[in-house]
Amino acid sequence: MTDTVLRTRVELLHLEGKIERWIRFGHVADEEILDRRRRAFWFRPDSVFAFIRWAAGDHGTLVSRIDILRACHANEAYTTIPGVAPGGEVLLRANGWAKVERVLQLIDQVEALGVQPADACPDHWRHIHNRLAAAEEPRPYTVRRHAAWLSRRSMNR
């Protein structure tokens, strides 16, 4: 099995004012330009990334969605997501512009700490997903929590 088989592929698209698919954060392992409007990014297993999908019709926004995903290993179960092959572990999913905008603000808060969102504890993204689903305010990510995550992660390696 080659390294390429183990990667998660995300196809990005930009049709001005109609369809936009982009990555908000993540450590891209490889990139391919398909044409003027399409690119593909590949992520290694365990990479965390945010994939945003937006589409509009004649009467306004049809789809506004953000998924924060973890790229899976070949033997793991995954959820299929349009534009993501084969799929990924869903850490957070938000639909509707108000929720997507809130998630983007929370990503900005993580970055304000000097932490790359892709390197933040995956449990933080799950926490945000669950709190937003319950219409509750998520706890903020902190430098202390990030240090605990890095310590825990190093012990598991």
Image (cartoon, rainbow, N blue to C red):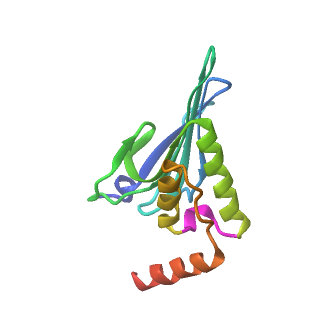
Viewer-proximal residue among 140 and 84: 140
Above or below, comparing residue 46 to residue 22 in the picture: below
Q: Where is residue 152 in the image (x, y as percent from the top left)?
A: 46, 81
Q: Residue 6 at what x, y percent from top left?
A: 36, 57
| Residues shaded magenta | 114-120
- Asked which quadrant contains residue 91, the reply is bottom left
Q: Is residue 106 above or below residue 84?
A: below
User: In this view of the protein, can residue 111 be seen by the observer?
Assistant: yes
The quadrant in which the N terminus is found is bottom left
Total numbered labels placed on residues in the image: 0
Give the residue drawn at x 53%, y 57%. Answer: 128
Vertical position of residue 20 compared to residue 58: above or below: below
In this view, the residue farthest toward the top is: 58
Residue 19 position within the rendered picture, expressed as x and y whole percent measured from the top left: 59, 27
In this picture, is 115 found above or below 70? below
Could you tell me which residue is drawn at 65 percent across and 44 percent down? 101
Residue at 46 percent across and 53 percent down: it is 69
Tell me the residue at 53%/81% (across/down): 148
Name the image quarter holding residue 57: top right
- Percent across and percent down for residue 103 are 61, 50
The reply to whether the magenta stretch includes residue 118 is: yes
Magenta span includes 41: no
Quarter holding residue 144: bottom right
Single out the residue that lies furthest toward the left: 75
